[in-house]
């Protein structure tokens, strides 16, 4: 078994341990957020962590009513014209906590008096030291270059922060269901392996997801690019209809991440449109009606509330990228041209 597959399978345990170990820390951070009452939240991240930040835009926006934006680190490191961050909540998300540009955003925010929070797998990293508060995800060493358990650990940490800001028991009870749903999602491994040969010849692929799973579309695309070298483009279904759908013809592969939620009707409409164009459609969902429209159904056996669904929904997408890489004869643990820690400025 490759390290990447092993780490995919470790994800339920990582999230379960995180919920036990860091609830008090999340509540401590949330108390500071409630005290400060930030005017907005700004998130600095790169790579898979940037996709976790996309999730944060929805979870902190929808559930905590925060205005959330993604930082432009070059303003801090290249142009040296940092925006006014006084009164903001600034969150740095990084697996290693070592990327200088992410650290620079948090450093500048701290100098301006903003409340700064680090979410990282490395509790002693430069990012954790730069922030006033840190939440370590405790995923353990990740040997594969492509992130898996650190990504879902970041999602869980953000969901915990949202639940703690909300200050009710209900969200925490829902969070406790996530590890079982992630374990059940591993059942998609057989379907992913069976589907892999159909994607081996693809030069391009599109990944779709909306709302909380906008992040899942981008993370699925990143895993496909990293592991299979297929040019993968991520979009929301709404944006996809505003132009990119023109490139879809018969056999064009699409991965749609669409667990049940308020976007159900839109997802069904999108699946119908893609069916008219005879696309090769893979669907990650807990909905039988959507899975029935897919040539490659990747089922989620346990449904989570929509705000938590990205924790389980990314698992079949990871397994699909792994299976395609192996079908292509590529080493999923060592993607070409990549290193485990990437330091950008």
Image (cartoon, rainbow, N blue to C red):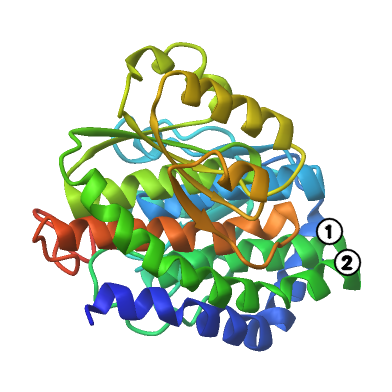
| Position of residue 139 measured from the top left corner of the image (x, y, whole percent) | 45, 80
Q: Residue at x 79, y 54 (%)?
A: 36
Contact flag, marks 2 and 1 (Cβ < 8 Å): yes
Q: Nearer the viewer, mark 2 or mark 1?
A: 2
Rendering quarter of residue 312: bottom right
Q: Nearer the viewer, residue 21 or 145?
A: 145
Q: Residue at x 48, y 25 (%)?
A: 274
Q: Is residue 76 above or below residue 167?
A: above
Q: Is residue 3 left or right of residue 122?
A: left
Residue 262 shows in this picture: yes
| Position of residue 204 measured from the top left corner of the image (x, y, whole percent) | 24, 32
| Residue matched to label 2 | 167
Q: Is residue 235 above or below residue 285?
A: above
Rendering quarter of residue 180: bottom right
Instruction: Kindly report the distance in space between the C-alpha atoms of the residues bearing marks 2 and 1.
Output: 10 Å
Disc 1, SS: helix
| Position of residue 122 measured from the top left corner of the image (x, y, whole percent) | 40, 77
Disc 2, SS: loop
Within-10-Å neighbours for mark 1: few <14, some 14–19, many 20+? few
Q: Is residue 293 left or right of residue 51?
A: right
Q: Count how many numbered circles sit on residues in the image.
A: 2
Q: Residue at x 56, y 54 (%)?
A: 91
Q: Nearer the viewer, residue 336 or 344?
A: 336
Q: What label does residue 171 carry, if any?
A: none
| Position of residue 41 measured from the top left corner of the image (x, y, whole percent) | 65, 44
Q: What label does residue 34 carry, if any?
A: 1
């Amino acid at each position: 078994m490759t390290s990447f597959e092993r780490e995919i399978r470790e994800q339920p345990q990582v999230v379960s341990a995180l919920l036990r170990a860091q609830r008090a820390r999340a509540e401590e951070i949330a108390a500071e957020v409630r005290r400060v009452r930030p005017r907005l939240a700004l998130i600095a991240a790169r790579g898979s962590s940037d996709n976790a930040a996309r999730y944060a835009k929805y979870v902190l926006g929808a559930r905590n009513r925060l205005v959330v934006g993604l930082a432009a680190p070059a303003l801090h490191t290249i142009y040296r014209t940092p925006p006014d961050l006084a009164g903001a909540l600034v969150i740095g998300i990084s697996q290693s906590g070592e990327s200088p540009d992410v650290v620079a955003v948090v450093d500048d925010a701290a100098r301006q008096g903003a409340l700064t929070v680090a979410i990282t797998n490395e509790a002693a990293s430069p990012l954790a030291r730069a922030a006033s508060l840190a939440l370590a995800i405790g995923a353990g060493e990740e040997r594969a270059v492509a992130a898996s358990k650190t990504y879902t650990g970041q999602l869980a940490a953000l969901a915990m922060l949202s639940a703690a800001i909300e200050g009710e028991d209900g969200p925490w009870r829902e969070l406790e269901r996530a590890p079982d749903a992630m374990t059940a999602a591993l059942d998609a491994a057989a379907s992913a392996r069976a589907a892999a040969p159909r994607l081996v010849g693809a030069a391009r692929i599109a990944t779709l997801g909306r709302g909380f799973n906008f992040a899942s579309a981008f993370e699925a695309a990143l895993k496909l690019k990293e592991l299979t070298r297929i040019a993968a483009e991520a979009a929301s279904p709404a944006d996809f209809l505003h132009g990119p759908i023109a490139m879809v013809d018969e056999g064009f592969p699409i991965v749609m991440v669409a667990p049940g939620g308020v976007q159900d009707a839109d997802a069904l409409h999108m699946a119908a449109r893609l069916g008219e164009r005879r696309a090769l459609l893979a669907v990650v969902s807990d909905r039988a009606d959507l899975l029935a429209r897919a040539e490659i159904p990747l089922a989620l056996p346990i449904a989570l509330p929509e705000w938590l669904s990205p924790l389980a929904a990314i698992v079949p997408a990871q397994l699909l990228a792994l299976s395609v890489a192996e079908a292509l004869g590529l080493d999923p643990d060592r993607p070409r041209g990549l290193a485990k820690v990437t330091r950008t400025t």
